[in-house]
Image: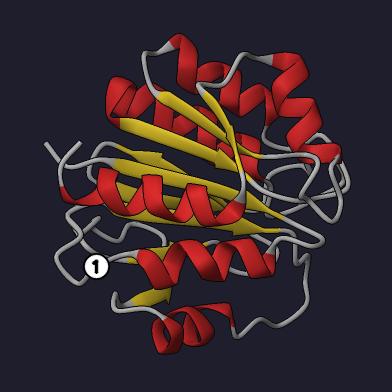
Amino acid sequence: MSPIIVIATSAGGLGPLLQIVEALPSTCRASVFIVQHIGTHQSSLPDILAHRGSLPAVFGRHGAVIERGHIYVAPPDRHMRLRFGSILLDRGIKVHFARPAADPLFISAAEAYGERVVGIVLSGANSDGAEGMRAITAHGGLGLVQDPGEAEFPDMPLAAVKRDHPAALLTSDRLAERVATICVGR
C-alpha cells in the first residue's frame, strides 16, 4: 500500500516545502497532503508546487478520490481531512487560530491510514501539527520534524517535539531525501 504523507507548514516553511516537493521523483507512489496557514487569502501554492516538482498538485476538493503520485493542498479557509480513499473539506472552527490547520488533517489521516502515514512539521509560529503528530505516531505512523535550529520560525517544530517523540529532527535537505526515499518504497 502506498504511503500517505501529510505536511504542516506556516511562516518560514515555503523554502523547506519546496525542497521536499522538488525531491519527489515522478515515480512517487505516495499521496501528499499539505496544509499551509493561509486563512482566507488566495493561494497559488498548487501551481508553484506543480511547476517546481514532477507531481501534479491541486487544491483538495470535497469528495475527491485520492490518487497516488498527487499532491493535494488545503484550499483557503477550509480544513482538509481524509477519509479512507477520499478528501473531506469543511469550515469547522479554527484550530490554533487557523483554518486550514494541520491537526485536523493529521488526526484524520492517522485514523484512516494508521501506519501508512508519514507526518512532517515544518517551520511555523504556533503549535499546529503537534497534536496531530502525536496521533500519527500513536497509530504506528512515522513522525518527522524540521530541525528547530534551522527553522525560521521554530514554534511548530518545537511543539511537535515537546508533544510527541518524532522519529527524527532533520534539516530540510535531509527531510527532502527521506521523503523521496519513502515515496518510492517505504
Give the mark count. Answer: 1
- 107 above or below 54? above
Quarter of the view holding residue 182 = top left
Question: Where is residue 96, by image quadrant?
Answer: top right
Q: Is residue 23 left or right of residue 130?
A: left
Q: Could you tell whether 11 is left or right of 7 in the image?
A: right
Q: Is residue 61 visible?
A: no
For the question of whether residue 116 can be seen, the reply is yes
Q: Image height check: is 3 above or below 24?
A: above
Q: Residue at x 50, y 48 (%)?
A: 175
Question: Residue 17, position in %: x, y?
Answer: 57, 63
In this rendered view, identify the residue nearer to me: 145 or 95. 145
**Which quadrant of the rendered structure holds the N terminus?**
top left
**Residue 146 versus residue 107: which sits nearer the camera?**
146
Relative to 74, residue 102 above or below: above
Image coords of residue 24 (percent x, y): 32, 64
Q: Picture coordinates of residue 30 (x, y %)?
A: 24, 51
> Depth check: 62 or 18 in front?
18
User: Which kind of residue does numbered mark 1 sit on?
Assistant: Pro
Name the residue at 19% across, 72% down.
Answer: 26
SS assignment at label 1: loop
Q: Is residue 52 above or below residue 97?
A: below
Q: Tell me if 89 is positioned left or right of 92 in this view.
A: left
Q: Quadrant of the C terminus?
A: top left
- Left or right side of 166 for 139: left
Write down the residue under mark 1.
25
Q: Which of the two residues, 141 or 61, is positioned nearer the viewer here? A: 141
The residue sitting at 46% across, 31% down in the picture is 108
Residue count near mark 1 (Cα–Cα under 10 Å), binned few <14, some 14–19, many ≥20: some
